[in-house]
Image: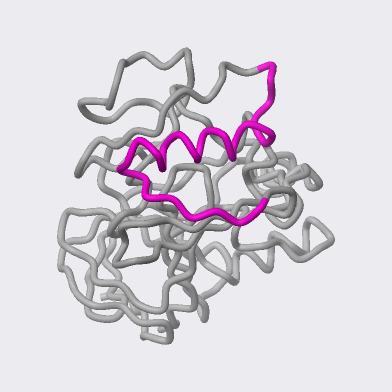
Amino acid sequence: MTGRLTHILRHPIKSIGWENLASVVLTAGAILPLDRHWAVAHEAAEFDGNPDGWYAKRNFVRGVAGPELMAVQAEMTDSNRKVRLSHPARPEMEIAPDTPQGAAALLEWLAPLWPTTRPAAARLVSAGDQALSDVPDPFVAVLNQSSLRAFGQRAGRDLSIHRFRGNLWLDGFAPWEEFDWIGKEIRVGEALLRVEEPITRCNATKVDPETGLPDVDTLGILEAAYGHRDFGVYATVIEGGALNIGDEASLT
């Protein structure tokens, strides 16, 4: 069975916005370029300054602790040197994340969206080539739109792809077929990926990414219907290449 690549998504700043891409070039052994390149560390983070490698998500501002963040949209501009952010309750803003001025502006912009009961957002950080993803491995998150439709039927409503913060969305496969791909290889466009493991979900997926408000018990639905909290799979790029929306996807 073959399918198609329907969405390419990047999240330049961890938990703070998603960006649609028309194309991307993947590199073997690497994440989707500039995905989770930056993150906002809070006051209780286990490191000072920029992290010297990967750190667990508990060190950062994230949607599960601040649901309103789920409604942020992002767009990289100026040859990927700047990030434009928007949110229903905040003015649109463009920052240069690697500058002190950009970092300070982001913290000020985020303040009304981050709960005062949580450790305050403290600094915008980067770990260089190490993505600040939820896992330390250089994975690409692959999701199946047929599974999303089946999930939505269980939930009694359409579910946005942006609840799940994936990178590559595929369509044309059977619902939940992606779990059978673990240990196998799939070619998407010019790139070849090896599917590694399921993605276990958290409470952030309960939040409507249009409003930033919790509205669906996604985890309860998954557990009741399927006996797990998994949605989507992680994959490793083993052969790099260009991907474009509409490219064919097929198991090899």
* Residue 88 drawn above or below residue 27: above
- Residue 1 visible from this viewpoint: no
Image spot of residue 117 (x, y percent): 69, 16
Question: What colouring method underlies this structural image?
Answer: one colour
- Pick whichever, 184 or 162, lies toward us: 162
Residue nearest the observer in this picture, 58 or 189: 58
Picture quadrant where residue 52 is located: top left
Q: Residue at x 31, y 76 (%)?
A: 188
Within the magenta stretch, is there residue 153? no
119 above or below 51? above
Q: In this orientation, does residue 216 appear?
A: yes
* Place of residue 190 in the rendered image (x, y in percent of width and height, measured from the top left): 22, 79
- In the rendered image, the quadrant that contains the C terminus is bottom left
Return the residue nearer the eye: 93 or 178.
Answer: 93
Quadrant position of the N terminus in the picture: bottom left
> Measured along the vertical axis of the image, is residue 47 above or below residue 139?
above
Picture residue at 78% right of the left edge, 47% below the top: 216
Q: Is residue 103 magenta?
A: yes
Question: Measured from the top left, where is residue 173 in percent x and y?
Answer: 50, 76
Residue lying at the far front in this picture: please name it: 101
Relative to residue 46, is residue 228 drawn left or right?
right
Instruction: Point out residue 208 in the picture as x, y percentages from the top left corner.
Output: 73, 52
Instruction: Please name the residue shown 81% across and 46% down the image.
Output: 215
Q: Which residues are magenta?
A: 91-117
Q: How many numbered discs?
A: 0
Report the residue at 37% width, 62% height from top. 181
Q: Is residue 19 left or right of residue 54?
A: right
Kindly indicate the quadrant of the structure image that contains residue 109.
top right
